[in-house]
Image (cartoon, rainbow, N blue to C red):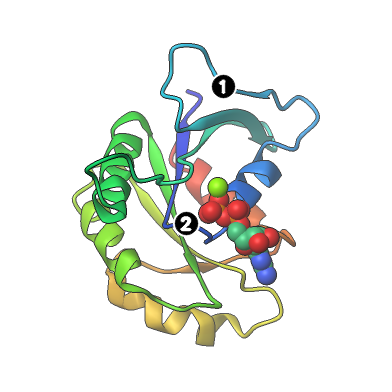
Amino acid sequence: MKPTIALVGRPNVGKSTLFNRLTRSKDALVHDLPGLTRDRHYGHGRVGSKPYLVVDTGGFEPVVDSGILHEMARQTLQAIDEADAVIFLTDARTGLTPQDKIIADRLRQSPRPVFLAVNKGEGGNRAVLAAEFYELALGEPYVVSGAHGDGIYALMEEVLAHF
Ligand code: GDP
Ligand code: MG
């Protein structure tokens, strides 16, 4: 089974940067599949012999009459709905924010596995960076750097081990 993995998180945590890294492999086919929602990007990738489809849940652009928090919640729920697993990105540089907590509330209700990633962790002490994110009650935080690649292989191995 080729799982669909959704990248979820508030704006600027690094979803698109991680998406690009996860779809960078030689046979990656990065495009928007016809018929699928326009506010998400889909791409193929592979770790070892395990292929996956990855979804970048995009910008949380607020639509008319809908605040950004509503839009975040809506896109998060949609992503959960169509994904087999979710990678929830947070940002080690800004630390835990109220928006992270709102998204985490939705994700804790997800029937799918959720992997908590603390991004932008390059050069830092992993245990120190991870510490405050245990409060989200989504299990062990994975300290990663989408930009530099740190921790990404370990995270993806863990995600793909479920499929
Ligand atoms: P998105 O809004 O969640 O899609 O976030 P982007 O991928 O557009 O990244 C937002 C900003 O964070 C950009 O300036 C990126 O260069 C930066 N960024 C993304 N990943 C990393 C990372 O691992 N480390 C650092 N230091 N910056 C990052
Ligand atoms: Mg983006």
Q: Position of residue 123 (x, y in %)?
A: 71, 80
Picture quarter containing residue 84?
top left
Which residue has dot 2 on it? 11
Could you classify mark 1 by the number of other residues whose Cα lies within 10 Å: few (under 14), some (14-19), or many (20 or more)?
some
Q: Position of residue 143 (x, y in %)?
A: 56, 70
Q: Position of residue 28 (x, y in %)?
A: 71, 27
Front one among 163 and 18: 18
Disc 2: residue Cβ within 8 A of ligand 1's nearest atom: yes
Farthest residue toward the top? Answer: 34
For the question of whether residue 56 can be seen, the reply is: yes
The image's mark for residue 32 is: 1
Residue placed at 52% from the left, 61% from the top?
Answer: 13
Farthest residue toward the left? Answer: 109
Front one among 82 and 75: 75
| 22 displayed left or right of 38 | right
Farthest residue toward the right? Answer: 26
Depicted 36 relative to depicted 11: above or below:
above
Could you classify mark 2 by the number of other residues whose Cα lies within 10 Å: few (under 14), some (14-19), or many (20 or more)?
some
| 131 displayed left or right of 105 | right
Q: At numbered mark 1, what does the secondary structure look like: helix, strand or loop? A: loop
> First in sequence: mark 1 or mark 2?
2
| 132 displayed left or right of 54 | left
Residue placed at 65% from the left, 83% from the top?
Answer: 124
Amino acid type, residue under disc 2 in the picture: Pro
| 144 displayed left or right of 80 | right
Q: Position of residue 25 (x, y in %)?
A: 76, 35
